[in-house]
Image (tube, rainbow, N blue to C red):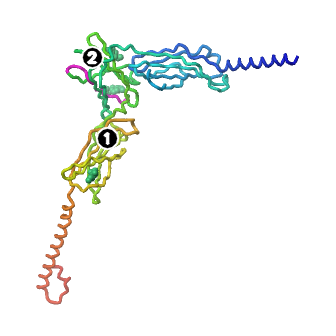
């Protein structure tokens, strides 16, 4: 008798465990993952629907782990969300890859996080034209945090009469905008000036340079920029060099003009001391934000030059461009010259005391004998 009910009980337990663990431990992936291009030159909209059995988990929270990358990237970028859509940036010249899984956690899972399988999707904008028709040497510099200047060269397969256009978008602009200030060479657009980009600072700025010849489309170039990493300040202003009695050079300057935030600058100061025939190499020093520097002069040379330039510091950007130099040269009197300068006052004081003594001698002769010397000071 006993074995029968024991067997039944253990079967029930095993079945219950399997049933409950399979019930708690699985959740389906999201459905209908879709990627659409809103025409923002890099940002894509990704949407999905909840898993079919999601209503069963009313004691649990349902979240999604969303990952994305361009084909060829090593790592996925990760976003956790409760929403059913995301807008993220891609390099549109490559294939965009996304994947999403459901995450379930709460009382229904004994507070253990349960993950579903992944659901995948890819996207690629139709790339017209041959790869060699894409523009070359595309460069941009953000001058003084005031305007962005981008330049390029025509692609290798650029027939006569080619027309290039630059389009840009950043978060906050309703739609992609076209450049309205092109730089031209023989009637061909080879660059663009963009003003008023303050709203785009510290964001992704998506740029597309595309082109056409008659009815043929050329391969578009897609780039994502970050303005603060492309900043180039003007040269520092009002460089003043002075020398203290202890032979130290005191260098002071003002931050460059324009919209460059002064707290975003670091400086490099260089000193060259001319030693007769051979001009010595520049010796470098740097400062972080400070606009003064004291240098002890190693070589007692006659002519020295000091120059200073600025760049965005690591507190504001990962990288930037150096400004041009501001330079100041000056001559310092030689040691021998200085000895002469010390001699002159000595000679002067000696000769004046000599004159005074002679005058005293004259007074003594005229005054009656025996009078103390100091009373004759009046004459
Ligand atoms: C600069 O951009 C802002 C919006 O970002 C706009 O309101 C303003 O009119 C623009 N100014 C100029 C001079 O274009
Ligand atoms: C260039 O790209 C812009 C923005 O996507 C688009 O409106 C325009 O039609 C394209 N021009 C050519 C010649 O492909
Ligand atoms: C001083 O002179 C030496 C060689 O005589 C040179 O190596 C050094 O760079 C000079 N220092 C400066 C600050 O010019």
The image shows residue 105, relative to residue 300, as above or below, that is: above
Earlier-in-chain disc, 2 versus 1: 2
Q: Position of residue 171 (x, y in %)?
A: 41, 24
Which label number is shown at residue 157? 2
SS for callout 1: strand
Provide the residue span drawn in magenta: 186-198
Left or right relative to 167: residue 349:
left
Extreme-top residue of the structure: 215
Q: Position of residue 51 (x, y in %)?
A: 58, 15
Kindly identify the residue that appears in the image at 26 percent across and 11 percent down.
214
Quarter holding the N terminus? top right
24 horizontally vs 358: left or right: right
Tell whether label 1 touches label 2 (CB within 8 Å).
no
The residue pinned by badge 1 equals 310
* Foreground pick, 219 / 212: 219
**Residue drawn at the location 26% of the way across and 13% of the way down:** 213
Residue 92 sits in which quadrant?
top left
């Amino acid at each position: 008798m006993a074995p029968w009910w024991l067997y039944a009980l253990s079967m029930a337990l095993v079945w219950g465990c399997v049933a409950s663990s399979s019930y708690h431990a699985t959740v389906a992936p999201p459905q209908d993952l879709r990627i659409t291009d809103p025409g923002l030159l890099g940002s894509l909209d990704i949407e999905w629907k909840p898993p079919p059995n999601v209503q069963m988990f009313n004691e649990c929270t349902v979240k999604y782990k969303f990952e994305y990358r361009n084909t060829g990237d090593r790592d996925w970028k990760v976003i956790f969300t409760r929403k059913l859509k995301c807008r993220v940036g891609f390099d549109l010249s490559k294939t965009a890859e996304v994947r999403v899984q459901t995450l379930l956690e709460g009382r229904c899972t004994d507070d253990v996080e349960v993950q579903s399988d992944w659901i995948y999707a890819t996207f690629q904008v139709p790339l017209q034209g041959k790869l060699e028709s894409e523009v070359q040497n595309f460069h941009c510099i953000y001058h003084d945090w005031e305007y962005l200047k981008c330049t390029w060269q025509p692609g290798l397969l650029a027939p006569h009469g080619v027309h290039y256009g630059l389009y840009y978008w950043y978060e906050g602009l309703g739609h992609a905008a076209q450049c309205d200030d092109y730089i031209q060479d023989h009637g061909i657009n080879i660059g663009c000036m963009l003003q008023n980009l303050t709203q785009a600072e510290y964001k992704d700025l998506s740029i597309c340079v595309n082109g056409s010849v008659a009815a043929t489309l050329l391969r578009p170039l897609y780039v994502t920029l970050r303005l603060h990493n492309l900043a180039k300040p003007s040269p520092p202003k009002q460089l003043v060099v002075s020398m203290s009695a202890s032979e130290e050079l005191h260098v002071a300057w003002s931050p460059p003009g324009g919209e460059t935030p002064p707290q975003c600058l670091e400086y490099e100061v260089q000193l060259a001391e001319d030693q007769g025939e051979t001009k010595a190499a520049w010796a470098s020093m740097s400062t972080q934000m400070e606009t003064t520097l004291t240098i002890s002069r190693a070589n007692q040379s006659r002519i020295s030059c000091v120059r200073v330039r600025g760049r965005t510091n690591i507190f504001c950007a990962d990288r930037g461009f150096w400004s041009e130099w501001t330079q100041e040269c000056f001559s310092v009197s030689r040691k021998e010259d200085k000895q002469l300068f010390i001699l002159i006052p000595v000679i002067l004081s000696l000769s004046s005391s000599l004159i005074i003594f002679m005058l005293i001698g004259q007074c003594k002769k005229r005054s009656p004998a025996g009078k103390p010397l100091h009373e004759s000071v009046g004459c």
